[in-house]
């Protein structure tokens, strides 16, 4: 990915997004719009971020019957965002339908948005997998299996934690995207995340891109926090 550092704009209004982005003036960023912001601001937020020259990951995690996901993706493709996603648990038919919808909804001459599948949320622990989802395979096996299904369905990649990246790369190759949230600096709070890693570990394990929210957005100086994490992601020395 050209810009492998994605900032999660988990804000509740366009006003808060504008305040957050103001000190980044002139910088073209890769930003993630999730449910909180999109459900509140809708198309206005996408239009605004595009006008400002940012790339957009629209993180709505579609998970429904194949026909509904196909038509949903057809609508999302018309927004001209760069990256969208589904839940791999929806199955191969659903993932293939997602791609069909994206292709059908992309205007002639434009590139369809990339599409990736969420494997297991980074807030899911081994215990939750076993006790709440009744899955007896290991996290690594489950995530890698979902990545193989997404690969067979011709998706562009997956959302996973840093810890599963090496196994996924081994199973489906290096060109399949591994986008990793749950990124924290060593001394940061994990909040509700379970399978966390530093930017440095994500780079070392070969993640295609990292997604960072609160470690930047809640920092007392977000611009400084962003550059500190970006430096670590690029392999430049940073002391905390
Ligand atoms: O497995 C997943 C899938 C998506 N996310 C999203 O990434 C950000 C992470 O935010 P932090 O504040 O850095 O924890 C957030 O928008 C999630 O919805 C994820 O964390 N894990």
Image: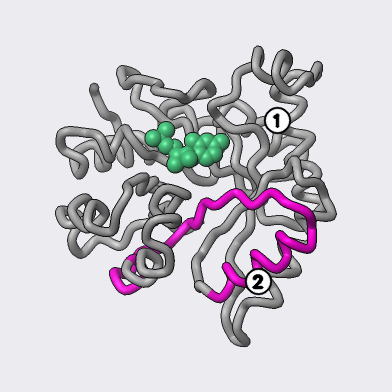
Q: Residue at x 45, y 55 (%)?
A: 39
Percent coordinates x, y for residue 148 in the rendering = 79, 42
Q: Does the magenta stretch include residue 65?
A: yes
Q: Name the residue under label 1.
A: 167
Q: Which residue is denoted by mark 2 in the rendering?
A: 74
x then y, percent, for residue 161 = 57, 31
Task: Give the mark nearer the N terminus: 1 vs 2.
Answer: 2
Q: Residue at x 31, y 36 (%)?
A: 229
Q: In this view, does 193 lie to the left or right of 232?
A: right
Instruction: Decide which of 73, 196 is in the foreground and name it.
Output: 73
Within 10 Å of disc 1 (Cα), the crowding (few <14, some 14-19, many 20+) is: some
Q: Front-most of 219 and 165?
A: 219
Image position of 79 (left or right of 50)? right
Instruction: Decide if residue 141 is on the left or right side of residue 13.
Output: right
Which residues make up the magenta segment?
49-78
Instruction: Point out the residue furthest to the bottom here.
Output: 108
* Residue 161 shows up from this direction: yes
Residue 210, above or below 166: below
| Disc 2 CB within 8 Å of nearest ligand 1 atom | no
Residue 211 in picture, x, y percent from top left: 44, 42
């Amino acid at each position: 990915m050209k810009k492998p550092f994605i900032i999660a704009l988990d804000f509740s209004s366009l006003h808060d997004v504008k305040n957050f982005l103001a000190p980044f003036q002139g910088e073209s960023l890769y930003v993630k719009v999730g449910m909180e912001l999109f459900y509140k601001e809708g198309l206005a937020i996408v239009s605004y971020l595009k006008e400002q020259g940012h790339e957009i990951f629209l993180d709505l995690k579609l998970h429904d019957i194949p026909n509904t996901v196909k038509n949903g993706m057809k609508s999302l493709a018309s927004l001209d965002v760069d990256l969208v996603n589904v839940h791999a648990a929806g199955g191969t038919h659903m993932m293939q339908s997602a791609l069909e919808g994206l292709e059908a909804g992309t205007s002639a001459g434009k590139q369809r948005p990339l599409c990736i599948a969420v494997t297991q949320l980074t807030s899911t622990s081994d215990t939750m997998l076993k006790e709440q989802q009744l899955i007896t395979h290991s996290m690594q096996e489950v995530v890698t299996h979902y990545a193989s299904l997404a690969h067979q369905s011709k998706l562009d990649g997956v959302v996973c934690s840093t810890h599963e990246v090496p196994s996924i790369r081994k199973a489906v190759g290096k060109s399949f995207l591994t986008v990793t949230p749950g990124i924290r600096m060593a001394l940061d709070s994990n909040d509700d995340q379970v399978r966390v890693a530093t930017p440095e570990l994500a780079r070392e394990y070969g993640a295609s891109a990292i997604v960072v929210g609160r470690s930047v957005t809640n920092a007392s100086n977000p611009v400084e926090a962003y550059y500190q994490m970006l430096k670590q992601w690029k392999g430049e020395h940073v002391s905390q």
